[in-house]
Amino acid sequence: MKTTQNPTFAELAVSRRKVKSEFFTQIDQIIDWRPISTLINRYYTKGLSAVGKPAYDGLLLFKMSLLQTWYGLSDYEIEDRLNDSISFSRFCGLSIEATAPDHSTLSRFRTILTHTKGYEKIMKALNKQLEAHKIIVKTGAIVDASIIDSPLKPKGKVSYEIVEDRADNEQTEENQKLEKEEKTLQKINNPGVDTQASWIKKAGKLRYGYKKHVVTDEEGLILGVLTTTASLNEISNLEEVLATADLPEGIPLKADKGYQSKKNEDLLKTKKLKNHILKRAKKNKPLSEWEKRFNKIIGQTRYKVERTFGGIKRWFYSGSARYRGQEKMHTQNLLEAMAYNLYRSPGIIMSKCEI
């Protein structure tokens, strides 16, 4: 979709320059942005800017968010790059004469779509188009979780404040004794700490942040995302994770042995999904030869979700929390999921053409 119907002389001139924008062209060929623009406008009302001019188009701001994610840029940096880069401005549909939205406009756009849950709907709409192109194929699914470290963690010694549980003026000796036993300690966090994040000990190392739970297809393309605090054990919320993805009945669900439980076995039966969770040895009951072979076969596909986590960290300079609070962290995870799926899409199409 081209947002500028009548290109200016300057635009025609720069279009002839040899700019390496093949990737952006490929994305524009894969995605029909018109329904995405319509969807964005349901959750983002443009209205007028503070100076009375028409506000920037929601699709332009969303594409800025994609560029920001692909290149690991801050709000300030994407504003500068959009003003300087021909390929960036053309992808966003910004004319040569126009000035890029400032960082505060992009931040407000992100906040509005976060509060209205618009990003979830946009991701589903994009995935529907990728599914129509046979880029996403739901013949199987994989579930896994990854910790996202927050730089806004408590530092130094921890201080505590003792808070009384009762405030009775007249107390018996028995009540005073009981009150003493029921005093609670409330942790006082240092200023700037993200209080919605939590601690978790993994591989002997304490980490502070959030946990990203994803459902992918068998090639690692992300179908659904759930964001929780880091301390939440993934074995307990498989149902919530599966609710983020529209999975057809009858397909296998692969996961590591950490998801193995009677509750999850019953859940997969209820949802009519094949149980391909890795088998786990129990006390005094090692894995049988059949279970070992089963794990080996499942592992040949299940590892692709770990490749997804690694790709997002490596390609997008990600791996740590950019925002404060669980709601905004969920937005980061959704944007990275959409950016990842789109980033891989041209290569998947090319590989199918070569077969």
Image (spheres, helix red, strand yellow):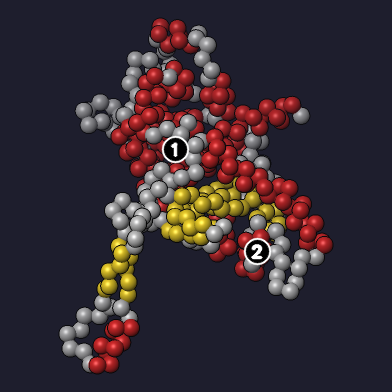
Q: CA distance from mark 1 to mark 2?
A: 38 Å
Whether 170 is drawn above or below 159: the answer is below
Q: Secondary structure at mark 1?
A: helix
Q: Residue at x 34, y 53 (%)?
A: 193
Q: Residues within 10 Å of mark 2 (few under 14, many from 20)?
A: some
Viewer can see residue 20: yes
Q: Which residue is labeled 1 in the image?
A: 39
Amino acid type at circle 1 is: Leu
Residue at 37%, 50% in the rendered image: 152
- Residue 103 image point, x, y percent: 32, 32
Q: Quadrant of residue 118?
A: top left
- The residue positioned farthest toward the bottom in the image shown: 173
Q: Could you say which is closer to the camera, residue 97 or residue 286?
A: 286
Q: Nearer the viewer, residue 44 or 333?
A: 333
Residue 244 horizontal side relative to residue 271, left or right: left
Q: Which residue is mark 2?
A: 260
Q: Is residue 323 left or right of residue 174?
A: right
Where 351 sits versus 302, above or below?
Answer: above
Quick one: which residue is furthest to the left in this view? 169
Q: How many marks?
A: 2
Q: Secondary structure at mark 2?
A: loop
